[in-house]
Amino acid sequence: MKKLIAAIALILILGIGVYSVVYMEQEIPITYDGRGTDVYELQQDPYDYDLSDPDGVAAIMVKENLAKTQAVNNVTAIVFDFRGYDTLGESFILLIAITGATVILRRGRGRMEGGKK
């Protein structure tokens, strides 16, 4: 009975996931299209890059990166400077998950061996 419930739950979750992906593909408009961004020009001379295209926000982030963060790599600057607290929170959650899994697995191993820790 438990296997049947688990199989139904898995099929339901997969079905909702597929439906969500299809819905997002058909209904939600694309907000960012990087086809118009000249990455080489932006990297070589970010202060004179044309910001009039719809991707202006991304270009502004790249253009003002060096002045605001002093980081040469734009990805590193966004992850560790602009989204630093978010990244710290994600790291904390990952650490808690690893610690919890370690505690659970150590207790289970001691019980299976029949000894006490």
Image (cartoon, rainbow, N blue to C red):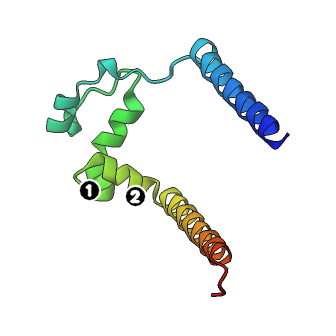
Question: Is residue 106 something that shows in the picture?
Answer: yes
Q: Nearer the viewer, residue 111 or 57?
A: 111
Left or right? Give the position of 8 relative to 105: right
Return the disc, 1 or 2, that comes first in the chain's sequence.
1
Kindly identify the residue that appears in the image at 63 percent across and 22 percent down.
Answer: 18
Question: Is residue 45 something that shows in the picture?
Answer: no
Q: Which residue is mark 2?
A: 81
Extreme-right residue of the structure: 1
Q: Nearer the viewer, residue 4 or 83?
A: 4
Residue 68, by quadrant, is bottom left
Position in image of residue 14 (x %, y %):
67, 28
For the residue marked with disc 2, what is the amino acid?
Asp
Left or right? Give the position of 42 relative to 3: left
Position in image of residue 64 (x %, y %):
31, 46
Q: In the drawing, what numbered circle is on residue 71?
A: 1
Q: Is residue 96 above or below residue 58?
A: below
Marks 1 & 2, CB-CB < 8 Å contact = yes
